[in-house]
Amino acid sequence: MASPEQDLTPVLDKDGVRLTVDDALATVTLTNPAKRNAQSPAMWRALAEAGRLLPGTVRVVVLRGEGQSFSAGLDRRMFTPEGIPGEPTFTELAGRDDAGLDASIAGYQEGFTWWRRSDLVTVAAVQGHAIGAGFQLALACDLRVVADDVQFAMRETSLGIVPDLTGTHPLVGLVGYARALEICVTGRFVGAEEAVGIGLANLAVPGDQLDGAAHDLAAALLAAPRDAVIETKALLRGASGRSYDDQRAAERAAQARRLRDLAGLGE
């Protein structure tokens, strides 16, 4: 199925990332299928830029990857002594002082952080391999629709490093500590049926229906009033960090804002 973005003029199209906007719906596409959408610092900077370029009209963002794989993880050149031209090698990163190394990794993470903004709902449409950084990019989104051939894997620990692109927090939130630990440390594949069963994915569909299913979900999300969606997302996102009584209070405060707004009595 052709992507609904195909006739839209890109807002951004660089370093393996394309952003298109159709009123309230934006689509971010990974556009290097020949390399299975392998990720690099340049791609991460482009992903961060896509977040900054989103117009205020956008309410839902769909993230997808061209080709057979959503993203097979880091560009393999990052693991070589030569690295990627123009980018620091792992050895060069390791040689930086604590503040410099922390700042470098924080910069890489920026491409993964904006997907959970309170004013957006983000949907990852994931097919084929979603490995390491690819898995973490899918986890950056609020929701995941997967093709029946999806293969999630977190391989960082097996390579002697750790997942550091914001994936650990949502993974534990979705599947629990024990299962998240097992998935990360073994580096095994998680397929579509298991992903839905453990709460990692919301829905699995045949591969040729993936784009359509993601955009059907986006349309359903757009049907609800924007301010009510924002308040509901904030309530749910914060629930795990609140006590039962604190959550009750947060519900009351949110509902008071909604009722006053609907009555025309809001600030």
Image (cartoon, helix red, strand yellow):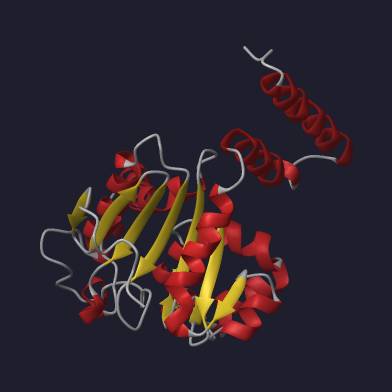
* Residue at 28% from the left image edge and 45% from the top image edge: 49
Q: Position of residue 140 (x, y in %)?
A: 49, 57
Quadrant holding the N terminus: bottom left
Looking at the rendering, which quadrant does residue 248 occupy? Answer: top right
Compared to residue 155, the image places residue 103 above or below, namely above
* Residue at 33% from the left image edge and 53% from the top image edge: 108
Q: Position of residue 152 (x, y in %)?
A: 50, 79
In the displayed structure image, the side of residue 10 where residue 252 appears, left or right: right
Compared to residue 166, the image places residue 251 above or below, namely above
Looking at the rendering, which quadrant does residue 193 occupy? Answer: bottom right
* Residue at 60% from the left image edge and 73% from the top image edge: 203
Compared to residue 71, the image places residue 260 above or below, namely above
Could you tell me how many numbered marks the image carries?
0
Which of 2/141 is in front?
2
Looking at this rendering, what residue extends furthest in the left direction? 85
From where the camera sits, is residue 97 visible? no
Which of 101/211 is in front?
211
In the displayed structure image, the side of residue 238 where residue 203 appears, left or right: left
Looking at this rendering, what residue extends furthest in the right direction? 245
From where the camera sits, is residue 146 visible? yes
* Residue at 71% from the left image edge and 27% from the top image edge: 258
Q: Position of residue 220 (x, y in %)?
A: 58, 56
Quadrant holding the C terminus: top right
Q: Position of residue 57 (x, y in %)?
A: 40, 37
